[in-house]
Image (cartoon, helix red, strand yellow):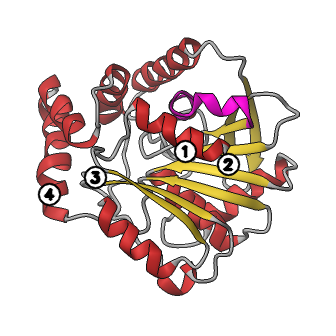
Amino acid sequence: MKSLFKSEQGKAEIVQLYDEKLNSLNMDVESIQVNTSFGTTNILVTGNAENPPIILVHGSNGCAPIALETYRNLTKSYRVYAVDVLAQPNKSAETRLSMKGDAYGKWMNEIIDKLNLDIVTMAGFSFGGLVILKTLEYDERKIKAVYLSAPAYIVNGNPLKALFRVFIPMKRYMRTKKPKYVEKFLAAVFTERDPFAIDFLSRVFLAFEMDFTPVPVIAATKAKTIKTPITIFAAKHDILFPGEKMIRRATKIFPSLKETRLFEDSKHVQNKAQNERIEEIIMQ
């Protein structure tokens, strides 16, 4: 299978940034490898082993250390398992799964089984929301509750807005290597500027084969079968998955929807204060 990394040097640079971010967290973290039928999955584990478990799922073109940093306070109440999603710029296998079928749900349920978790909470951002909803579709029996931040797979935004404000700046950076285009991309997606995201995505855009497959949305018939309590944190100024549109549809299709929160001043990626509010609600 051809690597998703365009060169060994590019891969090494991305892994170095991964390790630097992990080390900067100053957390007692164990890295474990879980074998699944889709390939080896790297998982970062931290927090008191006596605490209840929570699985964190990062967004597209991300990695587990970012998820740990985003919700680092969860270690006060949970044993945290931050998963490196397959086929992303991280340390898991490069097996690219289809977003249309049940592969992501099967994969995550295999991880839950291999970790011997019987009752687990899940929290995910963006693409991580799709992974979590696929998990519930496939087999939700071991899931206690899920918390989704600006999740994919419920609604999509205006494709023209996304094209001009997100994808064209990304493509221009890939062609010219001019940092201003990464800054422009991040300004459209991030609520506040993130220096690490600039460094990491600058390398990912050039050195990794990203997946530009259109993101599907969950069918109402499937959503209505889910029984697990769902909490959704949506962002009003989210170009990719608009918050108000998301809450309207989620309210209609999820009978197990427990709560929704709309961050009025948030873009797709929440800021530190908003993430801390999400943590507080998860730990209630």
Residue 8 screen position, x and y as percent: 45, 25
Viewer-side residue, 259 vs 213:
259
Foreground: disc 3 or disc 4: 3
Verify CB contact (< 8 Å) between mark 2 and mark 3.
no
Residue on which disc 2 sits: 39
Give the magenta-colored segment's residue range.
65-79
Q: Are marks 2 and 4 in contact (CB under 8 Å)?
A: no
Q: Earlier in the sequence, mark 2 or mark 4?
A: 2
Q: Identify the element where label 1 is drawn.
A: loop
Identify the mark nearer the N-term, 2 or 3: 2
Horizontal side of 118 relative to 186 (left or right) equals right
- Amino acid type, callout 3: Asp
Label 1 belongs to which residue?
94
Real-space CA distance between mark 2 and mark 4, rounded to the nearest whole angstrom: 36 Å
- Which residue is labeled 3 in the image? 238
* Residue marked by disc 4: 161
Q: Compute the Cα span from label 3 to label 4.
A: 11 Å
Q: How many C-alpha atoms fall within 10 Å of the one at disc 2: few (<14), some, or many (≥20)?
A: some
- Asked if residue 178 shows in the view, the reply is no
Question: Percent position (x, y) of residue 156?
Answer: 31, 66
3D distance between C-alphas at marks 2 and 3: 33 Å
Q: Report the mark closest to the observer, 2 or 4.
A: 4
Residue 16 in percent (x, y) is at 49, 17
Check residue 57 for magenta coloring.
no
Q: Residue at x 66, y 55 (%)?
A: 38
* Residue type at the position of mark 2: Gly
Circles 2 and 1: CB atoms closer than 8 Å: yes
